[in-house]
Amino acid sequence: MDQNQTPLFTGLKKHVSNDPIQFHIPGHKQGKGMDNEFSEFIGTQALSIDLINIQPLDDLHHPHGMIKEAQQLAAEAYGADYTFFSIQGTSGAIMTMVMSVCHPGDKIIVPRNVHKSVTTAIIFSGAIPIFIHPELDDSLGISHGITPESVKKACQAHPDAKAVLVINPTYFGVTADLTQIVQIAHDYDMPVLVDEAHGVHIHFHDRLPASAMQAGADLAATSVHKLGGALTQSSVLNLKEGLVSHEKVQSVLSMLTTTSTSYILLASLDTARRNLAIYGKDLLESTIQLADYARDHINKLPRLYCAGEEILGSSATYDYDPTKLIVSVKSLGITGYDAEVWLRNNHHIEVELSDLYNILCIVTPGDSEKEIDLLINALKDLSNTLGSREAIQETKVYVPEIPLLALTPREAFYSETETVPFKSSVGRISAEFIMVYPPGIPIFIPGEIITAENINYIHENVAAGLPVQGPEDDTLETIRVIKEHRAFK
Ligand SMILES: Cc1ncc(COP(=O)(O)O)c(C=O)c1O
C-alpha cells in the first residue's frame, strides 16, 4: 500500500471541487448559511469539507469506498488487521471494545485507575469488573499501570473472565511489560483490550514503549487527536483478529456512533496517519531530543525534579515515554495546581495537567527549541521565586486506598437512591462517579463504599483548586447514595 495516499481527504477535496449544488445537510452549505463572524474565523475551505455521509463520500457505518480505503491504509500503518475510525474520541472506542466482548454478567479484569469511559462501558454492558490495584509511585504521587504478576493472579482467580483491559501507556507515559501481559491473558484465551489514549505515537519510534499492536494485543483504542496530529475527537480502534471478530466490533461501534459523522474529523485521521507513517520516526526523533534537553535542564533547577529513566526497573515501570515531562514540584512546598496557575499568570504557559504534586507537560512535533526554552526559563523563575522562601515544607505524598465495591456499577447506577450530606456519607454506597478531571480517573465509582479517607482526599483536591467533577451536586455538599431500607418496628 502507498502510505502517501489519502483516499478520504483527496476524495473529499475532489467532490468539493466539482462544485455540487447542495440540497442536503449541513444546512450552512459551505458556511454561507451561518453566522458570519464564525464562518469568517473558521474559513471557507474548512467549511467546504464540513460534509456528512452523502453517497459519493462513503459511510462510516458501512464503509465500502474512500473510508474503507483510508481505514485499510491506517491498519497497515498501525500494525493492525483492521482499523476503525472513531469520531467520538477514544471514549467511544473504549466503550466499543468493552461492549464487543462483554455481555451482562460477564467478568472483565481492569485496573481500578481506569478512565471514566471504561466504567461507563461497564455500566452499559452490565459487566462485572474484577479490579486490579495499580502500582502506586509514593515518591511522585501517581498511579502506574498493572503488572504481569497481578494480571496472572487475576486470571488464575477468574479464569472465566471475558477480557483483560490495560492502560498502555498511562497518562504520565509509563508502561508495564505489555507483551508479557498479553501472553498471560492469551494463555487463558482472554482478549487484551488496551486503552492507548496516550500512545498513538509510540508505534512509530524504537525508543518509545511497544504499542498495543506490537505487543500482540487484540484491541486498542487510540487517541490520534491527542499525540498524533488529528483534530480533537478523532481516534482509531485497532483490531488484531483472532479472539474478537471485526464484524462484531463494526456493529457495536456503529451503535455508539452518531449518524452525522464529521468529514473534517475523518479527513484529519486520514492525513494524520499519512504523516505518522511517512514522517513519524523523524518527527519523533526530534521530539524525543527536545524532551531530553528539557528534562536535563529542568533537573538542574533547585527543588524541581523531572522524571526520567531512573524510574524504570519495577514490574509496573518497564518502559516510559520520554516525551512526557512529569515535573514534581512538591519540594517547593506547593501543589502542582499552584505551579500550573503560577506558570499561567507569570509566563503565559498552559500545562497538560496538574495534580497535588506534579505538573505534566507534553512535548510533540508541534514544539521547537523556542517553546522548550520558554518552559525551562519559566520553571527556572518558579524555582528561584518560590524556592528562595524560608522554611519550605515539602508536600507529603499521599494516595488514598481504593474503596471496596459492594454492588456492580450497573446495579448501583440503576438502584433506588437518596441524597445525603457528603460529610455524613461514610459507609454508604455511592451511586455517582467522583473524579478529578483531568485525568478523569475516578475516586469513587457507582457501587463503591464511601470512606472517610477518600472524602478527605476529595476535599484536599478541592482545596488545592483541582477540578473535582462527577456528582450531580457540583458544590459537593451532597452525594447520591444507594437507598437503605430499614426494617419497620
Ligand atoms: C487514560 C485515558 N483513557 C481514555 C481517555 C478518553 O480519550 P478521549 O478524550 O479521546 O475520548 C482519556 C482522556 O483523557 C484518558 O486519559
Image (spheres, rainbow, N blue to C red):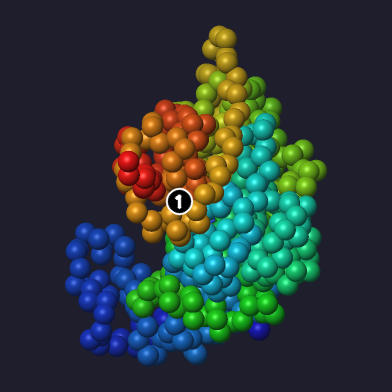
Q: Is residue 437 visible?
A: no
Q: Secondary structure at mark 1?
A: loop
As displayed, is residue 304 above or below residue 169?
above
Q: Quadrant of residue 325?
A: top right
On the image, the x and y values in percent for residue 43 come to 31, 65
Q: Which residue type carries mark 1?
A: Pro
As displayed, is residue 224 above or below residue 32?
above
- Residue displayed at 80% across by 43% down: 313
Residue that sits furthest to the front in the current view? 489
Which quadrant holds the N terminus? Answer: bottom right
Task: Tell which of 454 and 482 is nearer to you.
Answer: 482
Residue receiving disc 1: 446
Which quadrant holds the C terminus? Answer: top left
Looking at the image, residue 402 sits to the left or right of residue 474; the answer is right
Looking at the image, residue 189 sits to the left or right of residue 342; the answer is right
Task: Tell which of 172 and 145 is nearer to you.
Answer: 145
Q: Is residue 406 visible?
A: yes
Task: Tell which of 168 and 2 is nearer to you.
Answer: 168
On the image, the x and y values in percent for residue 79 come to 68, 73
- Residue displayed at 56% across by 84% down: 247
- Residue displayed at 36% across by 69% down: 46
On the image, the x and y values in percent for residue 347 come to 46, 32
As displayed, is residue 204 above or below residue 260?
above
Looking at the image, residue 117 sits to the left or right of residue 282; the answer is left
On the image, the x and y values in percent for residue 401 come to 59, 37
- Residue displayed at 56% across by 70% down: 102
As displayed, is residue 153 above or below residue 235?
above
* Disc 1 crowd, CA 10 A, few/some/many (<14, 14-19, 20+): many
Count of numbered tags: 1
Q: Quadrant of residue 396?
A: top right
Task: Tell which of 94 and 161 is nearer to you.
Answer: 161
Q: For the residue with label 1, is its CB less than 8 Å from the closest atom of ligand 1?
A: no
